[in-house]
Each structure stands twice: as structure tokens, then as C-alpha cells.
Amino acid sequence: MTIIGKRSTSWKQLGAAVCITGIAGVAVSVQAMAQEVSDVLPTTTKRPTHYAVAPESGTLPEKVLRARIPYVSATSSGAAYDIDGTKVNGGLSANIVATGLALEYGINDELSFGLLIPYVMKNDLGMDADNFKNQRGYFNSKRNFYESASALMMKQGICTNNDSCFALIETGYAFPYDLTVQLTTGEPLTVPAGVPLNQGVHHLIANSAKPESGATGMGDIDLGVKYRWFKNDTMGHAVGLVLHTPTGKYEDVTLSQRATGRGIMEIALRSNFDYQINEDFIAGWQHSIDYAVGKGKIKRSKLLENTELSDVDATAAEGSFADGFANSNEFERPGIRSSGFVDVKTSFARFSPMLASMGGKFRYGYDFDTSVRVEEMEDAVSNGFRGATERSSQQTLGLGLVFDGFQLESRVPVRVTWDIDAPVAGANKAVAAVRNAVVTELYYKF
């Protein structure tokens, strides 16, 4: 084995990190490659004061393997952001738990290769039907159903235009006879005589969006490389290329569940920059831009029974509102996803030498996601397809602690970090969750 510093070692290093970044619509996503690939093995006995808070631009030394093993949870009791950025109670509570394994290997001192395999262990949402009215998806579905009902009412001479029909529906208008219509999915729906249309629409939307236990299992596997091309005494910069492969569950996941992946291949370019403010503080900035390649596949769910995939013919017939789309379709994520964070880190050695193995950080994070388009449809829920036309975004503030075994006298090859990130702003975000992560890092020097 290799001698590190002055100590002969036979320990081995491992690395994995899974980060839950955003829950768009009724989706949560598990994010890409290890967020912090750092210089972790000292080549001399000197221990810099900022060592417990390694720089963002760092890469693994040559022939060093790291494995990060995380435990990540995301919870929310209903917090959401509407399309205008106003925080609301959106009625969706989240309880998501994920783990995984991220392996990184130093090809040389400037170039590292990484592999991330995320795994979702728990993926649940709950819903308060009354507060769900504050969700953007609810507004879209309500508008679409009101337009469909208005078309029937105008055909029968009950009202003359959408505005007058909408007003009549809002006051509790009910058909005086049973009426059977086809929904956009082709499913037949009977509206009983005397039932106010506004109540029927609310029940239908809430039923079609009611969540069940989400999908679990493997998420999207990521492959990437990171190259540090610049470093001096105060600054460093590295660039990376990441391939997000759609190995998670998405296509066959019903409307009642959350998916474990994004359902489409994406390529990300990543920039990692750090600046040493002084002996005690390091500032870092990571920024990623993701671009979806090609199209993904998605299947339609029933609206009247959202735990089942649709097998109904949606061909439009006279007097129906079926949209004619196939039950299995392609979707795309147009535009670019932009995400990252800015942080300031410090070693607690500045307070006492006994705290040299401890560090802390303050972080601002951001994620401006892409929209999801299924055949250019404007509404996900009322068509039985998961998705949204508008982009979603979320911004967070977070705190973190790190224990660095390399700072101990015995040089234990283990790092443990704990991070908590809470949402502070966003737009079109159905679930704004608080994220907790504990990550254990182990190392092996070949």
C-alpha cells in the first residue's frame, strides 16, 4: 500500500452522494454527481487550516478511490410556490428518503471520473383536497373542465359565452338530468342530475391527483468527469461533463405516484470555482447547465382511477371531449435547466486546535428547471399525463457541518457531512421540501 504523509496505511477510500434537489409538480428529483469532489489526501504532514472544508474545484489525487454513502430525506407539510412566486399551502405533504452510492476515481491529480447510482427507499406524498386548490395544476384542470362544461351549456342555449357559463357554474349550476360525457382521456363520466358542476369538477380533480405510495428503487444513473485546469494559492477552477441516464422509473408510473427519475437523457456541463478569502474561510460556486437529449416515453393514467394506466380509446366522438392522443406518448424537456449553489466554509480550528477535524458552511442554492411537454398539451392532470408547461424554480438557504477524520492524529480516512437546506423562494413548485442529508465518505489509495 501507499504511504500517505508519514503514516503507513492499509485503509481504503469510498464515495457516494445523492442530493434531492427539486420536487416539481408532483415530482421529486434525485440530483446528479457528487457535489463536492475535493482534495482529500494530504501529500505532506502539513495540515492547512481550511482542510476540513475542502475547495469546490478540487479533484481526487491520482489512484485514489472515494465512495460516498448518503442518507437523504426531504419533507414538507404543504409548502408550495405558485406561478407568481407566492408561497402557499398547496396541500401536498412529502416524505421522501433516498440513499445510493457515488464512486469517484482520480485518473491523475487534475482529472477524476465519477459514477452515481441513486436509490429511492421511500417516495410518498399526502394531500389535503381543500388546500390543493392553491396548486397551479388545480387551476389549469379547473379551467379546462369549465371550458368543456361551458361548451355543452352553450350548445343547449343555457349561456352564450365562456364568461357567462363560468359565472353560472361558480354559482352552483346543475344539469336537470343525468349527463354522460367522455373526458379528455376517453373515459365515460356520468354527471348526475342536480349535482352542482363546481362540486363535481372539484371532486374529479382531487380524485385524479390523489397520491398513493410513490415508486421506489433505482433512480437515474449518472456518469461524469471533472477536470481541474487552474489552481493557485487563492483560487481554483474545474469543469465537468455529466451524463444523466434515464434508468429510474418514469414511463410506467401512474399519476398517483412520484417517479424515481426524470425519464429522459440529459447532458450537463458543470463549473466549480473556489476562492480562499483568508486562512479561515473559503468561498465556492458550483453551476450546472443541463440539456435534454431527444425525447422520453410516458404513459397516460386514468382520471377516474389514477392508480391505473389508461387502456381507453381517446378518439373523439360526437359530444365528447376526448383529445385523441395515444395512451403511450413521447415527451420532451425544452430549454436548459440551470442549478447550483454558492457557499462559504470555515474550519473550526480557528476557534481551537482541538476542533481541527470539524468545519461548517453556509449555502445558497438554486434550481431553475425545465418544463415538461407532452405533445404540446397545456395541462398534465386533466389529460392524464404527468407534466407542466411552465418552468419551475426553487431557491434555498442551508447550513452544514463536517467531521474530517484526516485532521485527527491517527488520520482516519473517513469524512461525515450533515446538511440541511430549506426553501426560501420559488415559482410553480408543487412541493417545497426541507432537505436533510448525512453523507459518509470512505477512501482507498491504490
Image: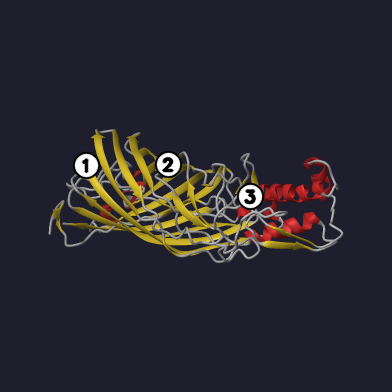
**Looking at the picture, how far across and down is residue 359, in whole percent?**
37, 48
Label at residue 137:
3
422 and 115: which is toward the camera? 115
Q: Residue at x 84, y 53 (%)?
A: 172
17 and 115: which is toward the camera? 115
Q: Is residue 7 left or right of residue 399?
A: left
Pointer 3 local density, CA inside 10 Å: few below 14, some 14–19, many at least 20: many
Precedes in sequence: disc 3 or disc 2:
3
**Looking at the picture, how far across and down is residue 289, in whole percent?**
40, 39
Type of amino acid at the residue the image marks with label 3: Gly
Task: Find disc 2 in the rendering and name its residue.
Answer: 340
Separation of marks 3 and 2 at Cα, in angstroms: 27 Å
Query: In terms of secondary structure, where does tag 2 sit?
Result: strand
Type of amino acid at the residue the image marks with label 2: Gly
Precedes in sequence: disc 2 or disc 1:
1
| Visible residue check, residue 53 | no
Query: In terms of secondary structure, where does tag 3 sit?
Result: helix
Task: Locate residue 443: give its quadrant.
Answer: bottom left
Task: Find disc 1 in the rendering and name its residue.
Answer: 110
| Visible residue check, residue 257 | yes
